[in-house]
């Protein structure tokens, strides 16, 4: 559980307005936002923005643009959010409001981060921090550091993320901002848990819990109790973890925090299983399934509630219509009949649409299943053919070449080599046969490496890169969590994809340094392959639709994973692969 991944500012309106009505409207909009009524809050903010622009009140417009940007962010509309933050930043620049400019830049960075454009996100956070340092605005400096930490966290550069979170935490402590301290402590807890440093994670979670209890924030109290329990489970501290979980679950149940209930129920199933109380473990696993289903249905329930509200509104309007048409009873029945007919038509259309959507869903699922089966069959056939050819090369051609070499060597004593030139020619023939034997063995091992069959993915990759001349390309390999074998099909697919990536680097990039990272955790396997070569323009369609890249995408999609390419001319290439286990 992580309550806040990043900080978005929300500007309060303690300004002297041109009219009391404006101030009251702004206060009302802020209160509506805090209760989650984003649509109504947006309507009021847009109304006050029009007034501010008409009155030439740029100072107020800066803050309204900012808050509208935040609302659009909550509504999942990043483009509209970005446009309003940019308007806020532009007005702040015109009026010399450096503080507001820094806050807008910081939130623009957060938007780019959510779109996974990490380089732009870091640029905007750095710009915001530079202004905040100039103004000696400690809170904004800390918030920029916190947001920068999140960027590195999303890139799985946990050590760097910890560095920035600690900077933010130190500043929050100096300015005694308990709410922000709690966020920074929780972020550090998550980081150390991701790095499998559970004692440190537990310590930070507990510190965050103390502050949350001081602030009386029941949601954060419940979340941190569950966080502590989750980390304790990793250290097999099931009894202590259970105590925290019980407390967190009780608070979450009281405040109706369903997402915390899901995590807590999952933890308790683990804890009771660890304590060998298997009936309880089964009971909580069942509860976990129920809460998970409820969480999935929240959006559906929300849609039903919206439909009910619309229905109630329609009913009120219908009553008004009935009162209006009572003077002409005949017309009333006529319009009532028409309305009923329309309603029945809409219901019939609705049922038809639902039926059609269900059929389309079934068809789509069948197509996806067939595509998966086809992909699996192609990959298996390809690997079987590789194995067959490798075996034929090794056991057939390789053995014949070895026999030829042996016969040549045995025949040497029967030859009457008259001079040194004949001896050199004979030795050259034997050397060529020997090199051919080695080449056949090398090709057969590349097609189906013994290390992959016997020792697993990490060792097979290491054996593969050890054959690369380090004078041409220096390769650094880091692996973690792959001590235990994974599914053989997954190992084979990942080996082929990494092999293709390395071969592309050797053939096309002109790089002299290649870094490969293989990390397996509870979420799956993460692979990054980064070189310092000449890179390429990923916006050019022909660069990303080659046969090799398509084959890599097909293989990773077969494993239900993702593969992404990040490259810029003259700045190298990064390939990021994530596969669930």
Image (cartoon, rainbow, N blue to C red):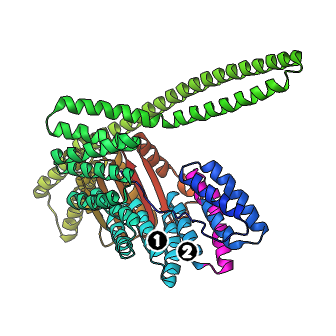
Q: Which residues are magenta?
A: 70-97
The chief SS type of the magenta part is helix
Q: Residue furthest bottom?
A: 134
Residue for point 19% across, 28% down: 279
Q: Is residue 437 shown to the viewer in this render?
A: no
Q: Quadrant of the C terminus?
A: top left
Vertically, is 377 above or below 40?
above
SS at mark 1 in the image: helix
Residue that carries the numbered disc 1 in the rendered image: 144
Residue 390: x and y, percent? 28, 43
Residue for point 54% across, 51% down: 545
Vertically, is 454 above or below 304?
below
Q: Nearer the viewer, residue 277 or 569?
A: 277
Q: Are marks 1 and 2 in contact (CB under 8 Å)?
A: yes
Q: Earlier in the sequence, mark 1 or mark 2?
A: 2
Residue that carries the numbered disc 2 in the rendered image: 102
Question: Is 506 in the magenta?
Answer: no
Q: Nearer the viewer, residue 196 or 258?
A: 258
Vertically, is 467 above or below 359?
below
Residue 47: x and y, percent? 73, 57
**Mark 2 Cα shell of 10 Å, populated few (<14), some (14-19), many (≥20):** many
Quarter of the image where one finds residue 486: top left
SS at mark 2 in the image: helix
Left or right of 410, for residue 431: right
Residue for point 18% across, 36% down: 273
Separation of residues labelled 1 and 2 (CA atoms): 9 Å
């Amino acid at each position: 559980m992580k309550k806040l991944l990043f900080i978005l500012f929300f500007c309060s309106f303690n300004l002297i307005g041109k009219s009391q009505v404006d101030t009251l409207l702004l206060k009302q909009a802020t209160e509506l936002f805090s209760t989650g009524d984003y649509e109504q809050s947006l309507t009021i903010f847009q109304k006050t923005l029009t007034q501010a622009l008409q009155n030439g009140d740029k100072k107020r417009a800066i803050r309204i643009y900012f808050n509208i940007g935040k609302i659009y962010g909550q509504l999942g509309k990043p483009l509209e959010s970005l446009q309003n933050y940019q308007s806020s930043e532009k007005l702040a620049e015109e009026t010399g409001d450096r503080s507001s400019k820094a806050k807008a830049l910081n939130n623009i960075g957060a938007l780019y981060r959510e779109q996974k454009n990490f380089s732009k996100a870091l640029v905007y956070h750095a710009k915001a921090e530079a202004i905040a340092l100039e103004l000696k605005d400690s809170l904004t400096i800390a918030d920029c550091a916190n947001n920068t930490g999140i960027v590195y966290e999303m890139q799985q550069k946990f050590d760097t993320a910890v560095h920035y979170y600690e900077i933010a935490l130190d500043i929050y402590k100096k300015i005694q901002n308990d709410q922000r301290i709690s966020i920074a402590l929780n972020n550090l807890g998550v980081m150390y848990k991701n790095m499998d440093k559970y004692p440190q994670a537990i310590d930070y979670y507990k510190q965050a819990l103390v502050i949350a209890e001081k602030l009386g924030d029941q949601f954060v109290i419940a979340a941190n109790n569950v966080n502590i329990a989750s980390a304790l489970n990793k250290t097999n501290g099931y009894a202590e973890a259970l105590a925290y979980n019980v407390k967190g679950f009780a608070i979450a149940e009281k405040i109706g925090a369903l997402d915390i209930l899901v995590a807590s129920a999952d933890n308790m199933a683990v804890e009771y299983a660890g304590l060998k109380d298997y009936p309880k473990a089964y009971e909580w696993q069942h509860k976990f399934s129920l809460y998970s289903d409820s969480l999935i249905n929240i959006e559906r329930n929300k849609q039903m509630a919206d439909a009910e509200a619309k229905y109630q509104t329609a009913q009120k309007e219908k009553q008004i219509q009935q009162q209006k048409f009572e003077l002409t009873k005949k017309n009333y029945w006529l319009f009532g009949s028409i309305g009923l007919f329309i309603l029945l038509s809409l219901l019939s259309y609705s049922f038809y649409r639902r039926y059609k959507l269900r059929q389309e869903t079934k068809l789509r699922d069948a197509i996806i299943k067939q595509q998966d089966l086809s992909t699996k069959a192609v990959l298996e056939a390809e690997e079987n053919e590789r194995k067959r050819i490798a075996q034929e090369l090794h056991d057939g051609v390789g053995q014949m070449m070895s026999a030829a070499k042996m016969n040549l060597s045995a025949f040497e004593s029967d030859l009457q080599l008259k001079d040194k030139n004949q001896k050199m020619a004979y030795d050259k023939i034997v050397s060529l046969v020997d090199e051919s034997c080695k080449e056949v063995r090398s090709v057969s091992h590349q097609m189906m490496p013994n290390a992959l069959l016997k020792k697993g993915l990490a060792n097979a990759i290491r054996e593969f890169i050890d054959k690369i001349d380090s004078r041409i390309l220096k390769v650094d390999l880091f692996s973690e969590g792959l001590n235990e074998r994974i599914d053989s099909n997954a190992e084979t697919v990942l080996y082929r994809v990494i092999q293709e990536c390395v071969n592309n680097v050797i053939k096309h990039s002109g790089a002299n340094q290649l870094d490969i990272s293989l990390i397996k955790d509870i979420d799956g396997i993460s692979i990054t392959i980064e070189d310092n070569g000449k890179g390429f323009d990923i916006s050019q369609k022909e660069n990303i639709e080659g046969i090799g890249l398509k084959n890599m995408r097909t293989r990773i999609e077969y494993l239900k994973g993702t593969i992404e390419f990040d490259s810029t001319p003259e700045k190298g290439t990064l390939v990021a692969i994530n596969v669930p286990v």
